[in-house]
Image (cartoon, helix red, strand yellow):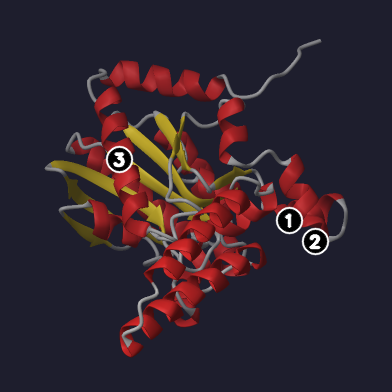
Amino acid sequence: MQGWDFEKPIIELKQKIEELRSFSTDEKVEMSSEISNLETKLKSLKKEIYSNLTPWQKVQISRHPRRPTTLDYLKSIADDYILLSGDRSFGEDHALICGFATIEGKKIAFAGHQKGKDTHENIKRNFGCAHPEGYRKAMRIMKLAERFKLPIVCFIDTPGAYPGIGAEERGQAQAIAENIRDMFSIKTPIIVMVVGEGGSGGALGIGVGDRVLICQYGYYSVISPEGCAAILWKDAAKREEAARVLKLTAPELIELKIVDEIIPESEGGAHWNPDESAASLKKSLLENISQVEGLSPQQLLEKRYQRFRKIGKFIEK
């Protein structure tokens, strides 16, 4: 299993346990006591490592190559789903997927960033960095959801919107700005979930909602740690310091009232036990939908507006 440097002791011990299990089965040697001792040690080691993570290490977990993607979550929590393509103006963006789904009999619309699991798929998905046509497609689906009175679920998982020349020529900044503006007027519940990375305007383009939730090891920030370090210190290597000062982890975001709830993940991150993490996400999602779907359209819009107006502090002189 792939892992970051701080996870290597866990991976090595886990491999040793598997080797002992295999040896015990093949050679018919009783080793249950040794395996049990190592499993106890593994549990203790995971608790020690994951309870003392730095902000940068949490960012690394949010980027883990085996971390569940939007499609993984849909396959796990939805009874069924259908993907819709195109912005009806330019074309299809594979980095931002949209469509309709049914979860526990409840129909929803969804929009979410989609990363790949290998090099080939990451190139197709543009590493989860959406183009303007992706954001315009998302708004097209949201307006359909409004017409049919369906709640909208947004899955955020991107290092940022794609900054390439083509994207800029097609109005990247305008597409994101229009989405932020228009999501404040959508007259149906919107639940936003940061399931991995929540980077910059790329996240905000589908980030306006009545509830903003974040997975335990997700991050949400105005800029990536590397980008911040490159601008402030002219040195991307200072990314660990940048991650610390940006206050981008889930507990810090709760304290700052940027997000409303932390969705628990399996110990050490969703990549260790995707099914357990998906079940936790599903439970939280359905609870939050039920909390806002009884509000009138006018109440929804006013509460949504006030929620974001309260973020941050300023002094007038």
Whichever of callouts 2 and 1 sits on the residue coming sooner in the sequence is: 1
Is 227 drawn above or below residue 13 in the view shown? above
- SS class, disc 2: helix
Q: Could you tell me the amino acid type at mark 2? A: Ala
If the image is split into quadrants, where does the C terminus sit? Answer: top right
Question: Would you say 278 lies left or right of 41 here?
Answer: left
Q: Is residue 119 left or right of residue 151?
A: right
Residue 13, quarter of picture: bottom right
Say which element carries label 1.
Answer: helix
User: Disc 2 marks which residue?
Assistant: 236
Please provide percent x and percent y for residue 222: 65, 43
Instruction: Give the residue type that dot 1 points to.
Output: Gly
Q: Which mark is residue 227?
A: 1
Q: CA distance from mark 2 to mark 1?
A: 7 Å
The spot of residue 309 in percent (x, y) is: 55, 21
Residue bearing mark 3: 152
Amino acid at dot 3 = Ile
Question: As drawn, is 199 to the left or to the right of 190?
Answer: right
Left or right relative to 301: residue 100 = left
The residue positioned 29% from the left and 63% from the top of the image is 85
Q: Name the one closer to the observer, 267 or 104.
A: 267
Q: Earlier in the sequence, mark 2 or mark 3?
A: 3
Q: Quadrant of residue 146?
A: top left
Residue 77, placed above or below residue 10: above
Query: Of residues 158 and 57, which is closer to you in this image?
Result: 57
- Label disc, if present, on residue 293 of the rendered structure: none
Please indicate, yes or no, whether residue 289 appears anywhere in the rendered image.
yes
